[in-house]
Amino acid sequence: MAAVWLEAMEHAVSLARTAGTLVREAVQRDMKVMMKSCSVDLVTQTDQKVEQLIVKSVKEKFPTHSFIGEESVAAGEPCVLSDAPTWIVDPVDGTTNFVHGFPFVAVSIGFAVNKQLLFGVVYSCMDDRMFSALRGGGAFCDHQPLRVSDQTDIHQSIVATEFGSCRDPDVVDKIFSSMKRILSLPVHGIRGVGTAALNLCLVASGSVEAYYEIGVHCWDYAAGALIVEEAGGVLMDVDGGPLDLMSRRVLAANCRSIAEQLVQQIQIFSPERDDADTESGAARDLKFH
Ligand code: LIP
């Protein structure tokens, strides 16, 4: 691995810790909550402040690198994954949790070159845990190696998923229908902590066997996806095809057979791709409430 990528990863770990401290401090205070695409898609000044801090620092240290950030895209920046070294950042993953003081919030930093993820860093702010993975170098939580569960029987598994932030009735029906089918397999349980990044870290840690979601964004799952892969897990699209970072669909599991059985149960839908139309990001109004 080139020294410059290792340097970038070290910088990402340090930035995630600094950002996470800001997030943890902000939870205690009053916050101004704004809406993005709809009334349940929230953003706060902390999301914006933390992203600005990360962008500024990355641009100073690695001026030639590209950047995809949740709040930059919301403000109209393009969401394009080119071959350039690209930082893919969610400053506050679990914004709804953050707003409500529900204690699962993460800073997520993925890094790709030639469209391939090279490292992922997920800092769990509320319990001060640093998850990281470097391609080919394994996955770790606070320097302890991570390994996915060795369970191969889906009936003895926990599956993580989320309701997401789309309230279109057809989408809500599909989400419930998938959950009902999976629950009835049966599985031991369905869980979700409200952040894609931490759900993926739960797969990597062996606490749940799988996680899937449709409607998330690349900044929610880029870093966690590599952490799962490096912990020995498998990644795919919810339709069983290869994972696509721009498709807004992710399925991660401890083993291929559990992933493939979930594919049979998931009701597919296709949100607009992250790279479909950068105009839609620019057109988003932020509404205060
Ligand atoms: C969140 C994701 C979560 C999803 C939410 C939201 P945010 O990201 O991590 O998995 O269910 O709808 O997209 O907006 O908190 O960064």
Image: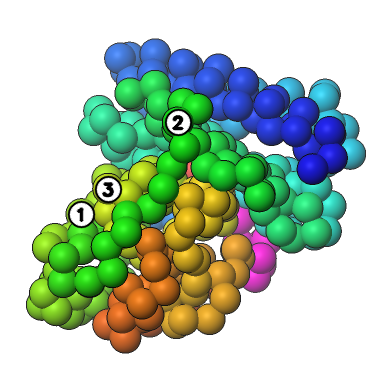
Label number found at residue 207:
3
Residue 70 placement: quadrant:
top right
Q: Residue at x 73, y 23 (%)?
A: 57
| Start-end of magenta stretch | 275-282
Callout 3: helix, strand or loop? loop
Amino acid type at image mark 3: Ser
Q: Label 2, secondary structure: give it.
A: strand
Q: Earlier in the sequence, mark 1 or mark 3?
A: 1
Instruction: Measure the alpha-carbon separation of dots 2 and 1.
Output: 24 Å
Q: Is residue 88 above or below residue 92?
A: below
Contact flag, marks 1 and 3 (Cβ < 8 Å): no
Write the residue at 44% across / 82% down. 239
Mark 1, Cα crowd under 10 Å, few <14 / some 14-19 / many 20+, is few
**Could you tell me the amino acid type at mark 1?**
Arg
Q: Secondary structure at mark 1?
A: strand
Q: Earlier in the sequence, mark 3 or mark 2?
A: 2
**Residue matched to label 2:** 144
Give the residue at x 84% y 40%. 2
Image coordinates of residue 145 in percent, x first then y, are 47, 37
Looking at the rendered image, the disc whose residue lies closer to the viewer, 3 or 2, is 2
Disc 3 CB within 8 Å of nearest ligand 1 atom: no
Marks 3 and 2, how far apart at CA: 15 Å
Residue bearing mark 1: 191
As shown in the figure, which amino acid type bears the numbered disc 2? Gln
